[in-house]
Amino acid sequence: RKEVEQDPGPFNVPEGATVAFNCTYSNSASQSFFWYRQDCRKEPKLLMSVYSSGNEDGRFTAQLNRASQYISLLIRDSKLSDSATYLCVGYNAGNMLTFGGGTRLMVKP
Amino acid sequence: IAGITQAPTSQILAAGRRMTLRCTQDMRHNAMYWYRQDLGLGLRLIHYSNTAGTTGKGEVPDGYSVSRANTDDFPLTLASAVPSQTSVYFCASSPSGGAANEQYFGPGTRLTVT
C-alpha cells in the first residue's frame, strides 16, 4: 500500500464549479503535508502547505483530518487555468517527502 | 540562472550505456533530491543529499548513484542503463532536509532506454 494515496481522476468540472480532492496517508506520525500542482510535461510546484487548523489561499482551501488520516483540497470558482494534476504530499516513516500519484483536474468551458 | 537547471532535457540511450544526468541549483540550498516519475506510480525518491558531502538512499536507489561534491551540483549516474529506467527524472532542492520544507523542482529530464 502506498503511504499517500489519491484518486487519480480525472475530475471533469465546468468553469465556476467547486471541486474537492481527498488524499489519505498511512504514516500517523506525519507532521507536514503539502499540495503541489503539476502541469502537463512540467515540474511540480508548491500550491500550498496544509496546516493543522486548515488554511485558505484565495480560491483554494486545504484541510487536515488527523483522526481519519486524510487531507483535502477544495477549489472554488474553478478556472480553465486550474486544469492540472494535483499531488498530495506527506512524510514517510523515514522522514522523507512522499508523493501521492496525483489527481487530474480538467476544467471545461 | 535562477533556480534549478537540469541537463539534458531529453535523451535516448541504448541499454548497457552509462549516463549522467546533471542538476545545478543557485539558491544555496543545502538539500537536494532526485526523483523519477512514472505513469501510475507518481514521484519516487531515488537518492537525496542533506548537505554537501553526504548522500542517502531513497525509495528506489538500485541502478543509480549520486555524488555531492559541492552545494550547487548533484549529478545522477546510471552505470548501465536498463529499459525499466525509462522515466522522467526530476531534481529538486530545499533549504534544508526534513519536514516542513518546500522543495523546488527542476524542469526534468526525459530518458528513454532502448
Image: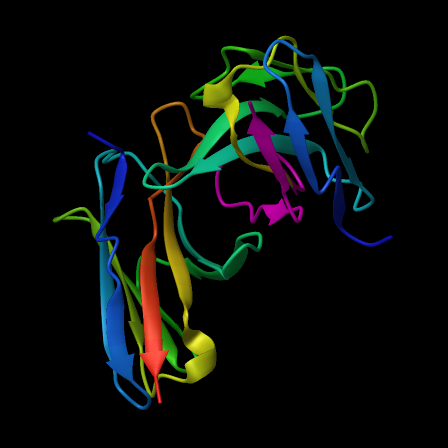
Image height of A98 relative to A12, above or below: above
Tell me which residue sits at (67%, 12%) in the image: B17
Q: Quadrant of the C terminus of chain B?
A: top right
Does residue A21 appear left or right of residue B100 in this picture? left
Front in this rendered view, residue A61 or A42: A42
Image height of A8 relative to A73, above or below: above
Does residue B32 appear left or right of residue B4 in this picture? left
> Which residue sits furthest right?
B1
Give the percent coordinates (x, y) of residue B90.
Answer: 59, 39
Front in this rendered view, residue A39 or B83: B83
Q: Is residue B98 visible?
A: no
Front in this rendered view, residue B39 or A85: B39
Tell me which residue sits at (59%, 14%) in the image: B15
- Where residue A103 sits, quadrant-wise, is bottom left
> Which residue sits furthest left?
A68
Give the percent coordinates (x, y) of residue B54.
Answer: 68, 15
Tell me which residue sits at (50%, 15%) in the image: B61
Image height of A106 relative to A89, above or below: below
Does residue B99 appear left or right of residue A30 in this picture? right
Residue segment shown in magenta: B93-114
Front in this rendered view, residue A75 or A101: A101
Give the percent coordinates (x, y) of residue B83.
Answer: 49, 20
B17 in magenta: no
Q: How many marks?
A: 0
Give the percent coordinates (x, y) of residue A15.
Answer: 33, 88
Q: How is colour applied across the structure in the image?
A: rainbow
Q: Is residue A52 visible?
A: yes
Tell me which residue sits at (32%, 38%) in the image: A30
